[in-house]
Image (spheres, helix red, strand yellow):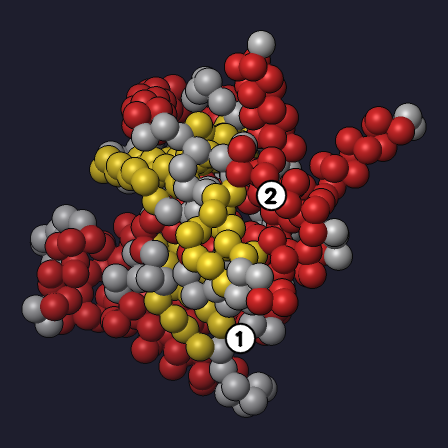
């Protein structure tokens, strides 16, 4: 290794260390950064200067008393130049959100659309238009979009959506098919929603996030990291068996949770004989009006959810379960029966039964987690942005 290469790789490492520290601690002075990273003050000042030039850090304007009475200006992640795109194909909507590096949402659009049994090209073509529109919005705001992550309902491995029975899609390279002018990765919707909850929700480091949609997925967060399983398919809670003699499921099994507490099953069960419940807002309306069919359907769904979660708790020793997706607005009607079902099965085994909490992010969790992943990638590796800013500054000097 030549000395120049060694110097470059050390600089890159130090950039990561300084930026990682700002990302973790929030607003911080250069002097405090020197103390926490063990780097000299002049090295920190140089690195912070480079990160400010690259538009990744900015001075907050807040002045703190520094060492030996010398005041220091706090630096924070900058929301002015770099941004990230979160995309989502759900069974009944498409969504796009734009997040800046300070993790502030700058733009969001959601289009209701029935994606069941559709051609991937048709749906992805529509999402592409929404994504390109978001990129134009970013440009108007002076933001450079560092990348995108696509959230999709189904197991994803090596860039391939293997089987999304609720969409009717199999073996689709959906991120690639979007053909956007930037890097697009893809991950399971429940996984990304769990990360959204971790980064934008309550901030607890250990929990199971349950995403109620037409299908039911879950994302397990342990020690602040997502547990994906060997093939990235961990958390298929919707196919945990509630009753082996129950109705047949799309997966080939019988009596899966999805058949009791998934959105379609729930709407079907909530309808009085000879009529239909048209959607979630109709269901919520009926619940608020005290409709007995709607109340009974939610109580049954809650009990089934509690039985499935009992298996998860026995297997994983969880302390906290966050209910998201449709379970967030339905929380008041399903959480009680779910908690009772868990209590009666777990109470004799465990000192405490895990608490159920409703997600405050609702249907936005997956796109926030998706865009948040890109933000975390930039913070973990700011080198290319610093190099680009330096090249641009040199070109301007010539
Ligand atoms: Zn199933």
97 horizontally vs 50: left or right = left
Label 2 environment density (alpha carbons within 10 Å; few <14, some 14–19, many ≥20): many
Q: Where is residue 13 in the image (x, y as percent from the top left)?
A: 74, 41
**Quadrant occupied by the C terminus:** top right
368 horizontally vs 24: left or right = left
Please give the name of the residue rendered at 38% of the width and 19% of the height, measured from the top-left corner. 121
Q: Is residue 228 above or below residue 130?
A: below
> Disc 2 to disc 1, how far (Cα)?
40 Å
Please give the name of the residue rendered at 57% of the width and 61% of the height, measured from the top-left corner. 70
Q: Where is residue 300 in the image (x, y as percent from the top left)?
A: 30, 69
User: Which callout, 2 or 1, points to the residue nearer the camera?
Assistant: 2
Does residue 143 appear anywhere in the picture?
Answer: yes
Q: Position of residue 98 (x, y in %)?
A: 37, 37
Label 1 environment density (alpha carbons within 10 Å; few <14, some 14–19, many ≥20): some
Does residue 93 appear anywhere in the picture?
Answer: no
Label 2 vs 1, first from the N-terminus: 2
In front of the other: 82 or 182: 82
Q: Residue furthest front?
A: 69
Q: Position of residue 176 (x, y in %)?
A: 51, 22
Q: How many labels does the image show?
A: 2
Q: CB of mark 2 within 8 Å of CB of mark 1?
A: no
Q: What residue is pinned by disc 1?
A: 319
Label placed on residue 48: 2
Q: In this view, does 333 lie above or below 240?
A: below
At mark 1, the secondary structure is loop
**Quadrant occupied by the N terminus:** top right
């Amino acid at each position: 290794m030549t000395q120049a290469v060694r110097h470059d790789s050390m600089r890159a490492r130090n950039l990561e260390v300084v930026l990682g520290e700002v990302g973790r601690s929030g607003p911080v002075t250069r002097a405090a950064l020197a103390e926490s990273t063990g780097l000299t003050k002049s090295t920190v000042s140089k690195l912070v200067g480079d990160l400010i030039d690259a538009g990744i850090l900015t001075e907050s304007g807040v002045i703190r008393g520094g060492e030996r009475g010398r005041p220091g200006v706090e630096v924070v992640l900058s929301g002015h130049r770099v941004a990230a795109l979160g995309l989502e194909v759900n069974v009944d909507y498409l969504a796009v959100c734009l997040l800046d590096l300070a993790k502030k949402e700058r733009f969001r659009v959601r289009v209701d659309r029935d994606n069941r049994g559709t051609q991937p090209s048709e749906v992805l073509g529509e999402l592409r238009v929404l994504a390109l529109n978001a990129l134009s919005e970013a440009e108007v705001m002076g933001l450079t979009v560092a990348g995108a992550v696509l959230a999709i309902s189904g197991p994803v491995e090596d860039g391939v959506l293997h089987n999304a029975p609720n969409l009717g899609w199999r073996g689709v390279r959906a991120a690639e098919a979007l053909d956007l002018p930037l890097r697009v990765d893809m991950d399971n919707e429940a996984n990304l929603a769990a990360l959204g909850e971790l980064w934008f929700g309550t901030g607890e480091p250990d929990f199971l996030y349950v995403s109620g949609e037409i299908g039911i997925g879950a994302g397990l967060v342990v020690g602040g990291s997502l547990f994906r399983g060997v093939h990235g398919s961990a958390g298929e809670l919707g196919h945990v068996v509630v009753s082996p003699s129950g109705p047949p499921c799309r997966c080939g099994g019988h009596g899966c949770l999805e058949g009791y507490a998934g959105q379609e099953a729930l709407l079907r069960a909530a309808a009085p004989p000879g009529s239909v419940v048209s959607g979630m807002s109709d269901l919520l309306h009926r619940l608020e009006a005290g409709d007995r069919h709607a109340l009974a359907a939610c109580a049954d769904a809650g009990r089934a959810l509690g039985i499935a979660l009992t298996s998860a708790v026995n297997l994983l020793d969880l302390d906290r379960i966050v209910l998201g997706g449709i379970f967030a607005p339905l929380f008041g009607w399903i959480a009680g029966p779910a908690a009772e079902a868990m209590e009666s099965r777990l109470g004799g085994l465990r000192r405490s039964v895990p608490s159920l909490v409703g997600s405050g992010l609702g249907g936005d969790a997956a796109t926030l987690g998706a865009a948040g992943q890109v933000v975390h990638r930039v913070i973990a590796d700011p080198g290319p942005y610093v190099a680009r800013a330096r090249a641009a500054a040199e070109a301007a000097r010539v």
